[in-house]
Every structure is written in structure tokens, then in C-alpha cells.
């Protein structure tokens, strides 16, 4: 369907005709300025050096001022040439990025989600089939690491982080509160906290930046119980650097671990793990985060909304 005359006039209202030199001359100058060589610019653009020289000379005539100082076997930019080169390089970078998006539409729909290994393994991966069904046009790439990545630099598109949601340069949204409680296999027949000394305590390392880590010393304090003295607490138990391994040890009946009610929800529902008693420890909340300005990109927004809907469910 052709566009009506009135809609064309409305779209063009207030727009002035562009007063630009020929694009061919601008490209020739930008390449020559980048290389400071007509020869290398010619190789880049697959033309002859004389053609580059001719286009640059035509551009200088159009602008009414020299853009290069032509030295013996060498080119140097004039002040005007340097200004034009800086502006053209920025403009061509923007043009190239726009064209690349059209050439590779599928690439613009790829979203990298970064989160810690436990959340990736126990919350995101079990939901991947549901995600593909809900967002068939988005390719979700999962980056599982306990090391924070730089979202502002583009190392990932979205992160799930625990903390207070206040990160410079990022937009965040609360996903869910996180709580930890003692859990174990039902084969241990653990009924009350008084039975803990008969079982191994399973420990898990927490990152140094954690706001309120769920560790056994804190649990005993909040339970109002005396913890094992000195090194006896860890010496009598198992210690892991990864929460997933601590969960597997608890499932196998090797002891009692402080585990996430969120990440172990399925094991609690199925009865593979039990939570015999409290107290429950709050460790803060999980947040979705992305670089400011990216939250409204279609693919990022789709993943953002899907994650939030899963958390609410």
C-alpha cells in the first residue's frame, strides 16, 4: 500500500534537504585520514590511489580549505581535516552498526544473562524450555559465574544479582527475596535443633561482598544456641566453594546444610529434602539489572518481563 501525499508531507515537515558532499568523497577522505596514506586507503576501498587523491581534492574544493598537508611520502591532517575525520569516524561507526543490525536480525535478538552458578543451575536452567516457548524470537545465552561482569561495558545484557539493587550505571528491579534454612535428606530423621550435634554440618563459601551470608555461625546466633567451639564447627563437617555441591551433599544424606528456599523449592516439594526446623535466615533479595538505557530494548525487555513473571509465579 502506497503512502498518501498527506502522510509524506507530515513525515517530511520541518526537515531540510541535507547539504552534504558526495558520500564517495567522504568515504575516500575518511579512509585516507585513517591510514594517512592514499595507497592504503585505495586498498581498503578497492580503487586506485589516483581515484582517492581525486576524491579528496574534490572534497577540499567543495569545502574551500585543505584537509591534508602533503609532505614527502607522507600525509598529515590539517586542523580542519582532523575535525572532519573525528566527526566522520563517529558517523560512519553509527551507520555501520545500523546496517549490521539489518544484515543480522537474529544477532540483535540474542540476550546474554549472567548470574551466579547456583542460580543458573537451579533456577534458570530448569525453566529454559518454558522460556523458549514464551519468547521464541529471543536466543537466551546463559553466563554462569560467581564473578560480577561489567554490564555497562556490554560483557552481558542482563544480570541476576543479590544485594541491595543499588549499582552505579545500572537499572535494577527486585526479583524475589531470598531466605535460607537448615535442610537435609529425610533419611537423617532429623526432628529438632537439639539433634544437630549428631550430624555433620555442610558449609558453603560466600562471596566477600555478600550483605548477609547464611553461615552456620549466624544461624546458631539467631537460633539462640551455642555453636561448636573454635574450629570444631568446620572440622566436623563438609565445606564446599559452590552451593550446588553443598545441595548435592545434603541430598545424598551427608549432613545438614543451610540452603536456599528458592533454589531448593522443587526438592522440598518432592520430599527429596526436608526443612526440619528454623530459624530462617534472610540474605537480601535477587535483582534483575541491566545498563541504563537498555531496559527498553525489545529483546532485553522480553527476557526481563519473563524473568519477573516466573519469579511472581
Image (tube, rainbow, N blue to C red):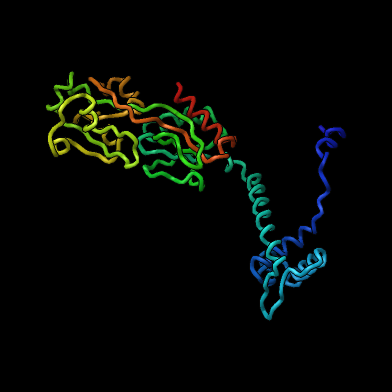
Q: Nearer the viewer, residue 284 or 247?
A: 284
Compared across the picture, whether 11 is left or right of 68 comes to right
Vertical placement of residue 302 versus 98, above or below: above
Residue at the (30%, 34%) spot, across then down: 213
Which image quarter holds the N terminus? top right
Residue at the (38%, 42%) spot, across then down: 145
Q: In the rendering, at what x and y percent does residue 154 appear? A: 51, 46
Vertical placement of residue 230 versus 33, above or below: above
User: Quick one: which residue is furthest to the right in this view?
Assistant: 5
Compared across the picture, whether 211 is left or right of 95 comes to left
Q: In the rendering, at what x and y percent does residue 22 appear? A: 79, 59
Residue at the (26%, 37%) spot, across then down: 204
Q: In the rendering, at what x and y percent does residue 243 appear? A: 30, 35
Q: Quadrant of residue 149?
A: top left
Compared across the picture, whether 262 is left or right of 297 comes to left
User: Quick one: which residue is furthest to the bottom in this view?
Assistant: 72
Q: Quadrant of residue 163?
A: top left
Tally of numbered tags: 0
Q: Nearer the viewer, residue 103 or 95?
A: 95
Which image quarter holds the C terminus? top left
Q: In the rendering, at what x and y percent does residue 14 appear? A: 82, 41
Compared across the picture, whether 131 is left or right of 177 comes to right
Q: Nearer the viewer, residue 82 or 31?
A: 82
Residue at the (46%, 22%) spot, across then down: 312
Amino acid at each position: 500500500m502506497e503512502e498518501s501525499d498527506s502522510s509524506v508531507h507530515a513525515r517530511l515537515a520541518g526537515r531540510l534537504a541535507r547539504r552534504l558532499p558526495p558520500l564517495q568523497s567522504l568515504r575516500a577522505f575518511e579512509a585516507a585520514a585513517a591510514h594517512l596514506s592514499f595507497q592504503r586507503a585505495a586498498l581498503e576501498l578497492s580503487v586506485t590511489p589516483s581515484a582517492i587523491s581525486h576524491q579528496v581534492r574534490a572534497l577540499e574544493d567543495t569545502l574551500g580549505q585543505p584537509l591534508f598537508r602533503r609532505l614527502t611520502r607522507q600525509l598529515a591532517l590539517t586542523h580542519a581535516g582532523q575535525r572532519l575525520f573525528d566527526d566522520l569516524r563517529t558517523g560512519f561507526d553509527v551507520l555501520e552498526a545500523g546496517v549490521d543490525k539489518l544484515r543480522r536480525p537474529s544477532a540483535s535478538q540474542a540476550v546474554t544473562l549472567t548470574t551466579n552458578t547456583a542460580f543458573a543451575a537451579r533456577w534458570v536452567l530448569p525453566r529454559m524450555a518454558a522460556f523458549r516457548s514464551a519468547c521464541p524470537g529471543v536466543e537466551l545465552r546463559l553466563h554462569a559465574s560467581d564473578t560480577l561482569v561489567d554490564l555497562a561495558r556490554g560483557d552481558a545484557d542482563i544480570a541476576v544479582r543479590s544485594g541491595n539493587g543499588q549499582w552505579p550505571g545500572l537499572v535494577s528491579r527486585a526479583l524475589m527475596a531470598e531466605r535460607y534454612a537448615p535442610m537435609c535428606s529425610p533419611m537423617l530423621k532429623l526432628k529438632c535443633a537439639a539433634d544437630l550435634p549428631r550430624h555433620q554440618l555442610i558449609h558453603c563459601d560466600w562471596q566477600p561482598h555478600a550483605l548477609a551470608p547464611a553461615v552456620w555461625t549466624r544461624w546458631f546466633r539467631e537460633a539462640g544456641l551455642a555453636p561448636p567451639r573454635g574450629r570444631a564447627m568446620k572440622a566436623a563437617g563438609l565445606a564446599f566453594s559452590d552451593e550446588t555441591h553443598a545441595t548435592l551433599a545434603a541430598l545424598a544424606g551427608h549432613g545438614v546444610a543451610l540452603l536456599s528456599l528458592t533454589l531448593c523449592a522443587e526438592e522440598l516439594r518432592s520430599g527429596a529434602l526436608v526443612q526440619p526446623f528454623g530459624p530462617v535466615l534472610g540474605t537480601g533479595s535477587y535483582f534483575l539489572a541491566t545498563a541504563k538505557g537498555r531496559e527498553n530494548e525489545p529483546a532485553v525487555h522480553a527476557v526481563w518481563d519473563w524473568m519477573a513473571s516466573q519469579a511472581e509465579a
